[in-house]
Amino acid sequence: MSVGDRPQRILTVSELTALVRERLEQGFPDLWIEGEVSNLRTPSSGHLYFTLKDQDSQIRAVLFRTGAQRIRFALREGLQIIVRGRVTVYEPRGEYQVVLDYLEPKGVGALQLALEQLKEKLSREGLFDVSRKRPLPFLPRRVGLVTSSSGAALHDMLVVLKRRCPALSILICPVPVQGDGAAQQIAEAVRTLGQSGKVDVMIVGRGGGSLEDLWCFNEEIVVRAIAASPVPVVSAVGHEIDYTLADFAADYRAPTPSAAAEAVAPVLDELVRGLRDLRGRQHRAMELRVTHIRHRLGAAEGLLSLRTLPLQSHAQRLDELTGRLAWSCKSSLVTCRQRITLRRHDLGLSSPLAQVRGARVLVPQFLKRVEQGMRSGLAFRSQIVRSLVQALDGLSPLAILARGYSIIQTVSDGAVVRRAGDLSVGETVRARLAEGQLICSVRQVVPKS
């Protein structure tokens, strides 16, 4: 290609990738896709990464944490799903992918799948066995009600109970019956009432609603609390067509809260029909309101997701770098451990302690040799000393004196007298014997003849 044919602008790889991402996001801002889940990854960040595939093709997909927290069923390999999202490009690798806003199992709703999964688990444990069901008391002294303090269900049950049996004592434990945290409070109320010993039977329920509205009565914590209750429990959740896992765990399932009141009270009441109509109207009004709010929320989420796309891309990049860092740290740790092991072995071979231990084996031998040498030297020197003593004894003046000789000394200056001519008559001398001394006076000097 000649210089004149060269394009006016040369793109970098990043610029080209950004242009491709922009075109894809503009061309596919919102679409529905059907496929099978494969290569599912769930890092600690809470995001979900997987491949969506059919028999001929595949595409990477990511569902960020805010969307993943809304999924009530367990996403698993091989699950056929329908997703909603938008096509974009993950720029660090130049791969196109689908960022999801919503997903559901194909052929069955997400909540329905979660419900079936939990129902199968608890059924295997025997929580729904008919043999566990207890009969309701014929004439209870006090009835416990676990429901919302502001819901129509509480009003219905109170009316039915009072009109059917005015002398019946009622203990109300108000709890939220939908929304976050409702399941925990319902379970705690069931346990508290059951262990208090103040009620003979308990009604747990609320008015009708969608599967989402009634979902807290499908939570495992609520089902287990009902199954473990020491007093019989009547489940009265929703309408007659509404079934929850609480219904299977309870001792008696009432189609409605009013029917539950009829079941525990010994007298019938003809006013139930009007109360059911009123509850149905309220339910329909709530459904219309919830539907309207849901549409507005869906539109707002679509707008918000477009603005959070760059942040989601960075979050995905962070997950990738976190994985690399973990692998690098693990590899470095293994290498360091191997080096430490080698250094420790080398250090053990050259350790002074090892040399000392080897030398300590020789110490007793050396001590024995020294002791033998000292004993031999001592015996030899003792023999020499004895010989010298004997020689000294032979040369000692005392030994000579012991044989009868004496040593003569002048008294005046103690000089030893060796010649008779050294003394004069009348001079006093000292004669030293082997034992004792004599003081003598010279009477005659006899010179040597």
Image (cartoon, rainbow, N blue to C red):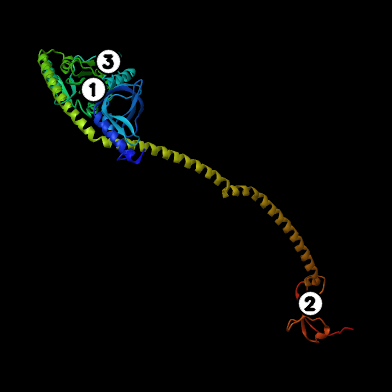
Q: Is residue 131 visible?
A: yes
Q: Residue at x 51, y 42 (%)?
A: 341
Give, as a three-letter code, the residue at label 1: Phe
Real-space Cα separation, disc 3 to disc 1, in angstroms:
18 Å
Q: Quadrant of the C terminus?
A: bottom right
Residue type highlighted by circle 3: Lys
- Amino acid bearing label 2: Ile
As drawn, 268 above or below 375: above
Query: In what quadrant of the picture does the N terminus appear?
Result: top left
**Mark 1 vs 2: CB contact within 8 A:** no
Residue tagged by mark 1?
A: 217
Question: Along the line of sight, which residue is nearer the eye, 421 or 242?
Answer: 242
Going from N to C along the chain, the mark reached first, 2 or 3, is 3
Gap between marks 2 and 3 measured at Cα = 137 Å
Q: Kindly identify which residue carries mark 3.
A: 133
Secondary element type, mark 2: strand
Q: Which mark is residue 407?
A: 2
Q: Quadrant of residue 5?
A: top left
Mark 3 or mark 1: name the one nearer the start of the chain.
3
